[in-house]
Amino acid sequence: MNKRPSFSKNLFWGVGVLCLLSFVNACKTKGEVRREQEMERLKTEVKEAKDIRADVDTTVEELKLEVARLSSVNEEQAAIHRNLAEELKNEVIALQQRIQALEQRAVAEELALKQPAPKESSSPSASYELGKKLYDEGKFDEALDVLREVYKKSSKNSEQAKKTQFLIGEVLFSAKDYASAALEFAEFRKAYSKDSLVPTAIYRQAWAFKNLGKNKESKLFFQDLIDRYPSHPMGQRAKNDIKK
């Protein structure tokens, strides 16, 4: 009779302990599950955040590349605009210069029209003097036109024709038309072989060939001048020139 209550009491406490342990184990299991779920959620959020960050970084890099490209394009466009502006500026300057030249030409022509025309002289000597004046002023083309007209009007063996032909050679030489000058002086020597201007004509021929780069021919003319006119001033000058 005394043993049964003790047994019941022990059984009651054993069952209670088991229930308590089961309750505690059940509570721990739910908490762990919740923690694990929370961790999984956090992991998911972290992964999504990392993916978003990667997308943002990619977008930023793309934007940087696009900005660099646009900057390069803008610089190229600016360079093109600068070049176009410079070309337009040069064209405007050239146009202004052309307009200025045309205006000056128009003024000169207007003044020329207002001036009375020079009276033509029937004297060949006066025309020769005009040609000589133009030559002295460095107006070689105009001087040649006048002197050739004088030569046509002059008698072949006249003093006027002789000095006109020689002056034509001088004008051509001064105008640096050395080939034509050499030919003109050759014609002068042929027509007036005994004239006192022949040594000067030979000297001019020598220098005409020298200026044309024909040193061999030039030397021949210098030597011919030295041989034929050793005591003439032109012969002495030829000696000095041939030494040089």
Image (cartoon, rainbow, N blue to C red):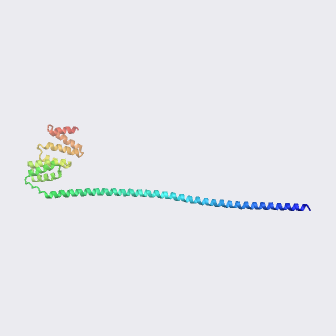
| Numbered circles on residues, count | 0
Residue 4 is situated, as x and y percent measured from the top left of the image, at 89, 62
What residue do we see at 23% from left, 43% from top? 216
Can the viewer see residue 30 in this picture? yes
Name above or below for residue 24 compared with residue 202. Answer: below
Q: Percent x, y for residue 71?
A: 44, 57
Percent x, y of residue 95: 27, 58
Drawn side of residue 189 relative to residue 244, left or right: left
Question: Furthest-left residue in view?
Answer: 123
Q: Nearer the viewer, residue 127 or 89?
A: 89
Q: On the image, which quarter does residue 235 sit in?
A: top left
Given the current orientation, which residue lies at the most extreme right position? 1
> In the picture, which quadrant includes the N terminus?
bottom right
- Pick the front one: 53 or 218: 53
Look at 81% across and 61% down and name the residue there: 16
Residue 169 visible to an observer of this rendering: no
Up the image or down, 32 lies above or below 130; here it is below
Q: If the image is split into quadrants, where does the C terminus sit?
A: top left
Q: Nearer the viewer, residue 105 or 71?
A: 71
Tell me what residue is drawn at x 80 percent, y 61 percent: 18
Q: Position of residue 126 (x, y in %)?
A: 9, 51
